Structures are given as C-alpha cells and as structure tokens.
Amino acid sequence: MRGLILDCLGGVYSVETDEGIISCKARGVFRNKEVTPFAGDICTVEDNVITGIEERRNSIIRPPLANLDVLFFVVSTCQPHPSLTLLDKFIAVCEYKGIKPMIVLTKNDLAVNEDIPVIYGNIGIDVIVVDYSDRSSVDRITDTVKGKVCAFTGNTGVGKSTLLNFIAPELELETAHISRKLGRGRHTTRVSRLYKLCGGYIADTPGFSSFDTIQYAYIAPEELSGCFTEFGEYFGECRFTDCRHIKEKGCAVIEAVEAGKISRSRHESYKLMFEEAKAVKPWEM
C-alpha cells in the first residue's frame, strides 16, 4: 500500500492509507542508507513495515518534514517581539526549497506592528493579521490549507498552538504562558505531527528560541541572492559581474536599497546570512 506518514513517536510511524491509519516500523535498510522517514513522506507499506519512500519535492530537517507546500511563519507583535532577521532567514529557506512562505501576525490586540505587512507585502508575501474576534481573518489560513501540506513554525510563545486550537478546537493542543523575565514561552509542542484539517494537512512544530539556517537548509553564499526575490530585478545591472551585493561600488542592489526600493532590513539580513554561509565548515554541511 501507499501511504502518507503523519508522525513518528518512539520509532513507530503513523501512516495514513486507503485502509485507514496504521502503525508501522521502518526497515533497517533506511538506517544503513542514512535515510530517515519524515512526516509528509509518501511511502510504501508491506505488513506494517515501511519498505520504500518516494522522492521528496523538498524537506526540512528541524523539524523533520517533507513535501511541504506552504510554511506559515507565526510571529507575534510582542511577547516575544518580532525578529525581522528570523523572518528573512525562513523566507530564504522557503525560496530555496520551493515552499510558499506566508506570515501570520498574532497578538494584535496587545500591540500593533505596521512594518511587517508593508515590508513583506511589498515583495509579494501574504501577511495575515489574526483577529480572533473576526473569524474571516483566520479563514484566509484555512482556505490556503485546502489540498496542501502545510506547517506552522515560529518562536516559542508566539501562539502557534493557540492559533491551531482556534482553527480546530478538537485538537486541544497545550499552550503556555510567556515568562516575563525571559520574554519567551516554554516549548509545548514536542513532536512534528501532521493533522488532517481544513481539506489538507497541517503540521504544528516545536517552537524555538534561536534559529540556525543550516538546520533547515545550507544555502551557499553564491546562491543566497536568488533567495531574496526583490534583488532579481537588479541582477545584471551591477558594475561587476561577480558582485556579491555586500558593499561593492556600482552595485545596483545597494543603490536600490539607498533609493528605498529595497527594504534596508532585508538587505541587512542578506549580508548577515552571507557571512554566516561563508563561515560554515564542510563538516557542518
């Protein structure tokens, strides 16, 4: 049978098949080939054993998910405060992996953030401002999920589980309060699991308090500029053909930043990621 891996707990995989959800083990050959089945993988099952995994369209390692169509980055206006650098890192990974990025802005009743909708809306990324008193604001999320495999990710405490509980109360996901001292929450989601909801599949993923791009994808320095889509308009216009768009004279990208055509915060994120990618050792890859 063919099936979709929904989750893994203690080496036992839940696989959705035409005959229902069954519990499976994975063949030892995967371990020998250094292949780990992920939630979202399409697999072959024989006698409750996963014997094969179909080629993935994409995958991320932390959390381990495969064949994603959409990655929702949940960011709060406060508690914890949003990090544009984090947003830019995730968006770059999505562009690199062929995953559609979307931003969900929470806690708008506590504070207002006008920068995020403007900065990211201008580069074609959907920004959904959640208002729990207005169901239609969440309907944009559920309409996106139909027929797709999606994941929600973001800092610990931004309200991912609260959001999913609002979309599907039957999930009863555990939520946590924000530590006033630390300005962040504690992890409540501990495993990556696909839920069949809203005509598609949604993964709630463990939150994080820091982010390392290489956990999701290694993007080589020379490939990074292609992950910032607004740079593309200026490719080929720089003075030097090998321009890195960092501080070179005659760089069309830098000129666009100075002219206000490219967000300065986006360019700062690009420069930071470029230096981080250069510093990656071969063994880290």
Image (spheres, grey):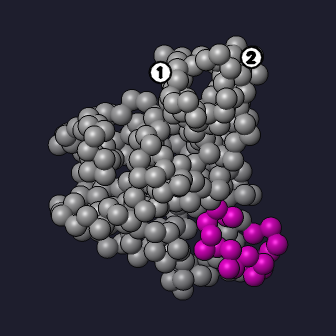
x and y, in percent, of residue 185 in the image: 27, 39
From the viewer's side, name the closer residue of 66 and 268: 66
Residue on which disc 1 sits: 9
User: From the viewer's perspective, is residue 76 above or below residue 156?
Assistant: below
Q: Where residue 84 is drawn, which disc sits there? A: none
State the SS at label 2: helix
x and y, in percent, of residue 282 in the image: 73, 35
What residue appears at the point 54 percent right and 53 percent down from the top-left corner?
Answer: 148
State the SS at label 1: strand
- Report, in whole angstroms, how far the alpha carbon at label 1 lies from the one at label 2: 19 Å
What residue appears at the point 46 percent right and 74 percent down from the top-left corner?
Answer: 121
User: From the viewer's perspective, is residue 266 above or below residue 253?
Assistant: above
Task: Judge from the rendering whether residue 231 lies leftward or rightward of residue 191; answer left or right.
Answer: right
Q: Quadrant of residue 135?
A: bottom left
Residue on which disc 2 sits: 29
Task: Judge from the rendering whether residue 113 lies leftward or rightward of residue 253; answer left or right.
Answer: left
Asked whether the viewer can see residue 217, the reply is no
